[in-house]
Image (tube, grey):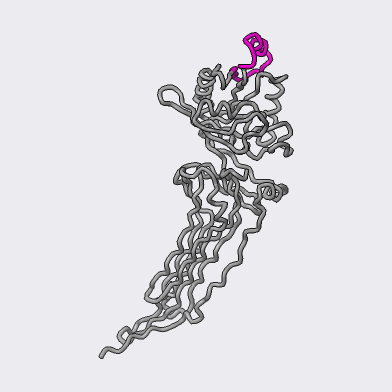
Amino acid sequence: MAESNFVDYVKIYCRSGKGGRGSMHMRRAKYIPNGGPDGGDGGRGGHVILRGNRNYWTLLHLRYERHAFATHGENGSRNKCFGKDGVDKIIEVPCGTVAYNAETGEYICDITEHGQEFILLKGGRGGLGNWHFRTATNQAPRYAQPGEPMQEMEVILELKLLADVGLVGFPNAGKSTLLSSITSAKPKIANYPFTTMEPNLGIVSYHEGKSFVMADIPGIIEGASEGRGLGLRFLRHIERNSLLLFMVPADTEDIKKEYEILLNELATFNPEMLDKQRVLAVTKCDLVDQDLIELLEPTLPEGIPHVFISAISGLGIAQLKDILWTELNRESNQLKGTETLVHRAKDRTILPEELRDMGEDEDLTVGVEDVPEDLDDFDYEYEEDEE
C-alpha cells in the first residue's frame, strides 16, 4: 500500500468558531443628550461544513490536513456595529463519503451528491449588545451577552464508492481481468492471490451510448469476517452498488459451495446486502470445453441469472453485459436504488481496534488557544467640542 494514493479512511479533528460577545458601550456626546446604550452584537462563529466534490476520488488530501478550524466571530462595538462573522471551514470530500463520531461511533451524515453540504459543527452564536436590553425602567443597561462557545469533535470519514455493479469473488477469480477487458481501467493483474490491494472503478460501455459503472474490490476469503486475508475492510465499497456480480472460476471443485461462502461473508458484514440483485459469472471458461460447461449447468445455484465467460477470449462477454443491463433496469431494482442506504453506528467495543488497524488511532485533539479578552469593554465615547 505504500505506493498507493488510494485513501478511503481518515480521522480528522474539527473545531467550529466561538461567537463574539456583545458590546456594553454607552454613548454620551456633547450634542447628543440622550445617548444611552449603543453596543452592537457579536459575530457568529464559523461553521465546519462537509461538501461533496465530484473532482475528488479519495480522501488523500485529508491525510495531510488533519485539523479543520473555523475562525471565531468578532466582538460587537460602539454605534450598534455588529462584529464580523467567523469564516466557515469547508471540507471538500468525494461523493460517497460517510462521517462518524470517532469517540462514540455514531453515524453523522452521508455525502452522496456534488455540492451537497452538511454542517458538521455549528459555530457559536454571537452575543447581543446592551442596546437590546434597554427598557423604560432600565435605560442604561451595563451588561451584554457573551458569545456561545465553540464545538469540537474528532470525525471518522469513510469513502464508499458509488458504482452500479460490484464484483465479488475469491482472490484470482478473474475480477481485475474482466474489469480491464470491458472498461478502460488498468488494474494490476498477476498470477498470485491478492493482486488487487485497492478498489478500482471502470465505466462499461453498452449499446447506443449507454454505460454503467463497475467496481472491483480486493478478493475475500472464507473467514474474512474474522479478519482473515484482507478482512472485510473493502466491502464498504459495494454497499451502495445496485447489483452484485459474483465471480467463480470454472475449474472450482464446487461452484455452488464457493458462491454460498461468499454470500455468507457478505451477510456477516451487512445483512442488508443480501437484498441486492445478484448475478453469477463462471469465469475462465477458456480452460474448459463445451461438454464440461453443460455438466456444470445443473450444479449452479438456483434463483439467480448466470453466464459462462472468458475475459481473455471474449466468450460470453456480450451476454454478460446484456444480463447486467437488464438486471440494473428491472423495476424492482430501480425501486431499491432510490432508497437511502441505512448506516449503522460503529461498535464502540471494536472501534479502537479498527482505528489501530487503519493507522488512525493518533490523538489529534489540540488545546484551545488563549484568546485575549478585552478587560475594559464598558467605555464611553465623547465627541470633541466644535470650535
- Give the percent coordinates (x, y) of residue 16: 53, 61
Q: Nearer the viewer, residue 174 or 382?
A: 174
Q: Is residue 302 magenta?
A: yes
Residue at position x 27%, y 88% in the image: 386
Quarter of the rendering containing residue 344: top right
Asked if residue 69 is positioned above or below residue 211 in the image, the reply reads below
- Give the percent coordinates (x, y) of residue 385: 30, 89
Q: Is residue 377 visible?
A: yes
Residue at position x 70%, y 30% in the image: 264
Q: Is residue 70 magenta?
A: no
Residue numbers of the magenta segment: 286-308
- Give the percent coordinates (x, y) of residue 307: 59, 18
Quarter of the rendering containing residue 36: bottom left
- Give the percent coordinates (x, y) of residue 88: 47, 59
Farthest residue, direction left: 387
- For residue 353, side relative to residue 8 (left or right): right
Dividing the image into 4 quarters, which one contains the C terminus? bottom left
